Image (cartoon, rainbow, N blue to C red):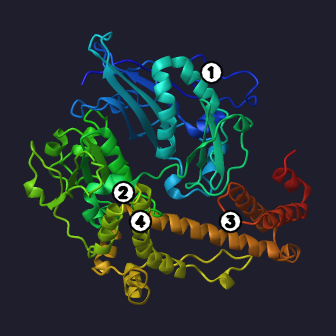
Amino acid sequence: MDQGAGAGAGPQRARGRLGAPSSGTRAPGTPWARFSAWLECVCVVTFDLELGQALEVRGPRKSSICYLSFPDSHSGCLGDTQFSFRIRQCGGQRRPGHAGEKRSDTGAPTSLQREPAHYFGYVYFRQVKDSSVKRGYFQKSLVLLSRLPFVRLFQALLGLVAPEFFDKLAPCLEAVCNEIDQWPVPAPGQTLSLPVMGVVLQVGAGGRLEGPCPGSHPLQTLLPAPVVLPSVHELDLFRCFRSVLAHVQLLWELMLLGEPLLVLAPSPAVSSEMVLALTSCLRPLKFCCDYRPYFTIHDSEFKEFTTRTQAPPNVVLGVTNPFFIKTLQHWPHILRVGEPKMSGDLPKQVKLKKPSRLKTLDTKPGLYTAYTAHLHRDKTLLRRLLKGLQKKRPSDVQTAVLRRHLLELTQSFIIPLEHYMASLMPLQKGIVPWKTPPQIRPFRQDDFLRSLEHTGPQLTCVLKGDWLGLYRRFFKSPHFDGWYRQRHREMTQKLEALHLEAICEANIEIWMKDKSEVEVVDLILKLRERLVRAQGHQLPVKEATLKRARLYIDTAIGSLPKDLQAVLCPP
């Protein structure tokens, strides 16, 4: 495919281009801080017969963004299309997060926290006949680049902005960037009103929308009824999985085990939605593997993902070019899907096929894998969904049924792990003020597997099968490593918080009576370190404990000679 010219604007490049600040609307010294809390930059990619696609103004990963912003020549997308992609951030380009970003992630589910090393690209692509253009077609994409996985919110935003932009071009984007720069910072658990182009998007920034929305913007009373988005990230799971419902449980196992999976779809829209739907199957467990909703042969990581000199990487790869079937024949799992059909009946389900039946040129829809599921299929789920179709149940209700099934399956699998992990925590009575807190006991896989007889998933899940075998394979996956590291970090922080509370409940003056200056200084430094971590929301400590810790630090410093006090508290 040829490539062409486009435009981009971000917080550092917006003045005089997209989103130039209007006077008197921002606090001095914080230009584009609120814009940056939501978006990294806005890019425009347009097709030029001689140049191909390229950004008019430089942005991060310029070449990759250009190729990923257009469907490849195999898709044949006419009209308007929305899809998304995810790219790795280049080394040396990382922008340090500001305090607002860190606060907005605190308390958010792990699956909704901003990505530190990847960008999400949300694309609105238009291709229509245009006799005034040399090639005969108008081809342009508007792209929002963000670290936030808010696919539903940004798709809705593009649905409002892109059609207007294609008519009015840059002046429209300038106004939109100014409006985004006045949005409140995303905050978990809060409902936000986000005015843009005469419309208010009402969203729950922590995930789902709950309760009425408080008046969070002065323009709200002057605008029409808001466009309510119940979720910032959840897709229509039933629509995405309509053709693979018979294999949802097997796909859930592949995701749980972090298996490499190639998704070949007829368009970037189908590809990106299928990949995002698959990676959402494990919630609330964080998806710890790499995934690319839409990937092309022009991506800088193409060689890394297609090499045959080592095992396929743990990645879910969404593509539209059949060339990948030939290039990735050695991958253990390949899912080919067709165009989704939204008729009243359940569409023809893709068949489970052996990889040996994979044809390079004429590969029919199917799940090509030699994997055998550990758990027996839940036939009642498919019956419920079929019954819902017969009764013309709305798609969002069908999605709720499917999402609940996957949630309960994941929880049944994770709860025994959580119970065993909790048993490794030292008893609180063993935490004493003036000694190093006890260590978390090591996770022993054999001990855990033995515990399943009495605390296993059979207590909460009716599915039969080889649960032990599934756990054994899970222990080798990136998801176990990610889950264990996160839980161990949380437990370590809890231990530190309990130790700090124990110190603050003790009598520091009695302790200091027979202690040397070195020991007192050591306590001061440790307390200060804990305070810094607690104030950065890294320790679950009450405010009363923090006040007591500050008082103890002052008391300890006051007991030292003047010269040491001057060192510890310089003027």
Badge 3 crowding class, 10 Å Cα cut-off, few under 14, some 14 to 19, many 20 or more, is some
Q: Is residue 66 depicted above or below 234 in this figure?
A: above
Q: CA distance from mark 1 to mark 3?
A: 40 Å
Label 2 belongs to which residue?
238
Give the image location of residue 423, x and y in percent.
53, 82
- The amino acid on which the numbered mark 3 sits, given as a three-letter code, is Pro
Judging depth in this view, the residue of 23 and 118 nearest the camera is 23
- Label 2: few (<14), some (14–19) or many (≥20) C-alpha neighbours in 10 Å: many
Q: Is residue 229 visible?
A: yes
Of label 1 and label 4, which has the lower sequence position?
A: 1
Q: Is residue 246 left or right of residue 556?
A: left
Please tell me whether mark 1 or mark 3 is closer to you in this view. 1
Image disc number at residue 401: 4
Relative vertical location of residue 260 with respect to residue 298 in this rendering, above or below: below
> What residue is shown at x 79% (from left), y 63% (from top)?
543
**Comes first in the chain, label 3 or label 2:** 2
Which residue has dot 3 on it? Answer: 540
